[in-house]
Image (cartoon, grey):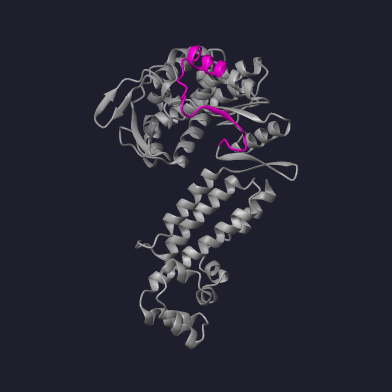
């Protein structure tokens, strides 16, 4: 059986179709939704399989969308047509088990059984072993700049089936639709395609091999990677040599402004930095990651919004659960306690504003157990919202238990669970 026959095997195509449907996502240039995919596949199964098997299948251009980044710039994403996503997924399911075993153990991104937490844990281990300088190299628009022919040359080391290679080439060359305008795709494997992660790993595996050949300690997660050395002079040399390899051999562009050498205790990697405490090496969220988390909560608890309190609690729970699940490997008990207390103040402030009128405030304070005189005094306070949120009377009325009863998840409990289960 040829490799392409495994791609069009009914079980493989059905699995690919179900993966695309479960992943949801927006329509591509043809407007087909994931809900329409199953009916489409059943109606056109025979001609679709025949075209894939012969290599005559022609993918549609990807739809270009831009999403905002933290720094105010925009990340370019490509949205393939839903049917193209299914075909890409079917190819991926066949080639991934063949290619992945060749990858470096120091590569953690978009791989089965690998994740960012393992990557940062390995970085902490290097630091513990005395590699206290990090070479942090930033690639400029990596996914949009991968040279197609070089990528195919590297891919042929693992996949020899000419039809699969032909189809992958077609996906790379399918072009981009920006509004109503079509543009050719000279380079890149745009983020958003089902083949993009493995193709990007195939290309940067050449970097992994080069770093291993030179005996370097490194950790890579997709296009984020750091190299760990013992001394600054060695770091300067590694930065120069690695930049030369990336730009000279791999024809990629290094962002000189963002690339630097420094201490892993200060440089951010996957949102973390390394922390040494009581002779124990740990990881913790970088201050920029903490600031971003707090900014999200601040926005969700802004006073000038029309959302219901239930909706606000729902969105807060989504943010805190996601953030703590990711950063829960860190030792950050004091930070969690601090941000939790701050959030409670923000919610009390929001509730105090929503009550608005003196009569409403008085009535609710009485309802929540405050004595008549104290409730009347607090209801008539001229303190601003933030100062009022710290008032003892309001704390007695809106206790932590009351916030929990309204659905707010306890960040301390979320953190203890995440930390203990890692």
Q: Does residue 404 appear anywhere in the picture?
A: yes
For the question of whether residue 9 can be seen, the reply is: no
Q: Residue at x 38, y 70 (%)?
A: 354
Vertically, is 81 above or below 415? above
**Location of residue 166 (image quadrant):** top left
Residue 221, picture quadrant: top right
Please give the count of numbered marks on the rendered protein: 0
Q: Quadrant of the N terminus?
A: top right
Is residue 142 on the magenta stretch? no
> Which residue appears farthest toward the front when viewing the image?
233
The furthest residue to the bottom: 372
Work out whether 258 lies above or below 387: above
Q: Position of residue 217 (x, y in %)?
A: 66, 24
Q: Nearer the viewer, residue 375 or 159?
A: 375
Q: Tell me if residue 243 is in the magenta stretch.
A: yes
Is the C terminus in the top left, top right, bottom left or bottom right quadrant? top right
Question: Is 393 displayed left or right of 331 in the figure?
Answer: left
Is 220 displayed left or right of 25 in the figure?
right
Question: Which residue is found at the position 64% from the left and 36% from the top?
Answer: 118
Q: Is residue 241 above or below residue 140?
A: above
- The stretch in magenta equals 240-268
Please tell me which residue is depicted at 42% across the width and 68% down the height of the picture. Answer: 385
Q: Nearer the viewer, residue 120 or 165?
A: 120
């Amino acid at each position: 059986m040829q490799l392409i026959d495994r791609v069009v095997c009914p079980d493989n195509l059905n699995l690919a179709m179900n993966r695309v449907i479960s992943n949801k996502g927006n329509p591509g240039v043809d407007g087909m939704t994931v809900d329409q995919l199953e009916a489409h596949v059943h109606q056109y199964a025979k001609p679709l399989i025949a075209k894939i098997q012969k290599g005559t299948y022609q993918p549609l251009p990807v739809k270009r969308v831009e999403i905002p980044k933290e720094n105010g710039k925009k990340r370019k994403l490509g949205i393939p047509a839903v049917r193209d996503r299914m075909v890409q997924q079917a190819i991926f399911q066949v080639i991934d088990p063949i290619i992945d075993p060749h990858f470096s153990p120091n590569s953690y991104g978009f791989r089965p059984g690998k994740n960012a937490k393992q990557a940062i844990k390995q970085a902490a281990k290097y630091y513990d072993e005395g590699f206290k300088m990090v070479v942090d190299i930033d690639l400029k628009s990596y996914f949009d700049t991968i040279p197609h022919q070089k990528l195919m040359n590297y891919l042929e080391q693992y996949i020899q089936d000419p039809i699969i290679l032909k189809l992958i080439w077609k996906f790379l060359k399918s072009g981009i639709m920006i509004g109503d305008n079509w543009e050719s795709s000279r380079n890149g494997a745009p983020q958003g395609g089902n083949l993009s992660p493995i193709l990007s790993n195939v290309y940067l595996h050449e970097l992994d091999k080069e770093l291993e050949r030179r005996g370097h300690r490194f950790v890579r997660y997709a296009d984020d990677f750091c190299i760990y050395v013992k001394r600054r002079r060695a770091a300067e040399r590694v930065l120069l040599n690695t930049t030369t390899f990336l730009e000279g051999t791999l024809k990629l562009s290094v962002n000189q402004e963002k690339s630097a050498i420094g201490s892993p205790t200060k440089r951010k990697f996957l949102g973390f930095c390394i922390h040494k405490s009581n002779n124990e090496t740990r990881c913790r969220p970088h201050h920029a990651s903490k600031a971003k988390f707090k900014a999200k909560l601040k926005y969700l608890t802004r006073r000038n919004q029309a959302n219901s309190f239930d909706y606000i609690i729902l969105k807060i729970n989504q943010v805190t659960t996601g953030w703590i699940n990711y950063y829960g490997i860190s030792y950050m008990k004091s930070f969690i306690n601090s941000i939790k207390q701050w959030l409670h103040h923000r919610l009390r402030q929001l509730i105090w504003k929503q009550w608005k009128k003196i009569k409403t405030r008085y009535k609710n304070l009485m309802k929540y157990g405050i004595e008549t005189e104290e409730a009347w005094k607090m209801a008539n306070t001229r303190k601003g919202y933030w100062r009022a949120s710290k008032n003892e009377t309001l704390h007695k009325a809106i206790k932590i238990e009351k916030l929990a009863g309204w659905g707010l998840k306890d960040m301390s409990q979320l953190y203890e669970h995440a930390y203990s289960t890692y």
